[in-house]
Amino acid sequence: MITIASPIVGDEEIAAVTDVLKSGILAQGPKVAELEKVFADYCGVKYVAAVSSGTAAIHAALYAAGVGPGDEVITVPFSFIATVNPIIKLGATPKFVDIDPKTYNMDVKKLKRSITNKTKVIMPVHLYGQPADMDEIMKIAKAHGLLVVEDAAQAVGATYKGKKTGALGDIGCFSLYATKNIMCGEGGLITTDSEEFITAIRQFRQHGMSGVYQYEGLGYNYRMTDIQAAIAIEQLKKADGFNAKRQKNAKALAEKLQHNKKLELPKELDDRSHVYHQFTVRLKDAIPSRDKIVEAFKKKGVGVGVYYPQALHTIPHIAKHGFSLKDFPASLSAAASVLSLPIHPNLTDADLDTIAAATQEVV
Ligand SMILES: *Cc1c(COP(=O)(O)O)cnc(C)c1O
């Protein structure tokens, strides 16, 4: 079976974990501090905080941005649900801007009209590994006095006009979940150039403490362990190599599938790099039978994925914030017609042939 994701653990990760286990410091310690330093250098930002997950990263980032009851946070309805749940958890209201059907990222032409006097943060998602239109988003945010939090969970190492994700907005959020481009099982990273934000984030991940049992406000236990950090440090050394392999696989797959009239292939924009967390195609006229298509792939030994089958504004606990099931047609259409093919760095040339052949037969 060719799986949709495949975490790559080498001898380096195993040795690094063994060292931590022998060191006597297992919870947040020197390895977390080292990871924060190397990731800050990698992204080109001043500060990084490591946390327990990408979801925790988004929660802490929005908290540091001052999001609370009465505020609105603008994001997209076509993403993983962890983009939106932290907004609701903070007592704020999610607002959505529909996506561009070609890139699946925020349609910035529609952004301005969704800003109100309650808007506090704009949170674009770099979906599937390609950065959103950050210049336009930053320009609109500045003009309205808003902060920008990047959901970069799928886009570690991707660049926009030469700058890395995580260094494009005011705060950036990454995930190190097992299927992401680099991983440590579970984990998250937060990037920023602001001393004020990083201080708030570090307190928030540690019960709101600024010193020993000195409480500054609300907080949780969102710490990362040194065991996880040791894995992530080794993964980060390999990140550019992993991404290059994903890009090479994407190019090969796109070439093999370019004449299939029933598929719309991923669109790469010139001024940014796509790190292919997912290689997502759109099924042009096979929409009613997508479940059957997924089954047929499985029978041929190819694990495909649907990211994501439901637009977020249609999920009951989000819909009740005032959305109609007919809102955001581009997101509804994408949710009904996308399909992701395996693209991870572990694939062989033979695997890519198998995936392409299965796609030609099934679709
Ligand atoms: C994975 C992901 C998250 C959440 O990260 P976790 O580490 O799983 O909590 C948030 N947003 C997007 C777009 C993601 O893909």
Image: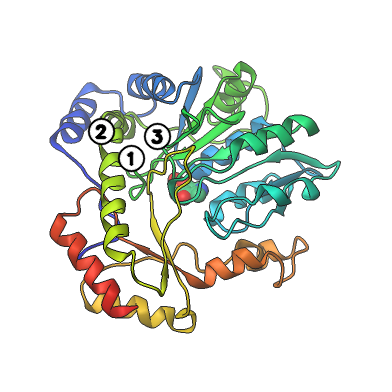
The correct choice, above or below, for 281 with respect to 126 in the image is: below
Can residue 66 be seen in this snapshot? no
- The residue to which callout 2 is attached is 238
Secondary structure category for the residue under label 2: helix
Going 31% across and 52% down the picture, which residue do you hit? 250
Instruction: Give percent across and percent down for residue 337.
Output: 49, 71
Question: Is 362 placed left or right of 215 in the picture?
Answer: left
Decide which of tag 1 and tag 3 comes sooner along the chain. 3
User: Residue 262 or 114: which is nearer the viewer?
Assistant: 262
Q: Residue furthest front?
A: 259
Q: Nearer the viewer, mark 1 or mark 3?
A: 3
The correct choice, above or below, for 163 with respect to 105 in the image is: above
User: Residue 92 or 363: which is nearer the viewer?
Assistant: 363
The correct choice, above or below, for 288 with respect to 73 in the image is: below
Amino acid type of the residue tagged 3 in the rendering: Gly
- The residue to which callout 1 is attached is 182
Secondary structure category for the residue under label 1: loop
Q: Are marks 1 and 3 in contact (CB under 8 Å)?
A: no
Within-10-Å neighbours for mark 1: few <14, some 14–19, many 20+: many
Q: Which label is found at residue 157?
A: 3
Q: Are marks 2 and 1 in contact (CB under 8 Å)?
A: yes
Within-10-Å neighbours for mark 3: few <14, some 14–19, many 20+: many
Decide which of tag 3 and tag 2 comes sooner along the chain. 3
User: Residue 349 or 311: which is nearer the viewer?
Assistant: 349
The quadrant holding residue 181 is: top left
Separation (CA) of disc 1 from disc 3: 10 Å
Secondary structure category for the residue under label 3: loop
Question: Is 43 placed left or right of 93 in the picture?
Answer: left
Quarter of the figure with the N terminus: bottom left
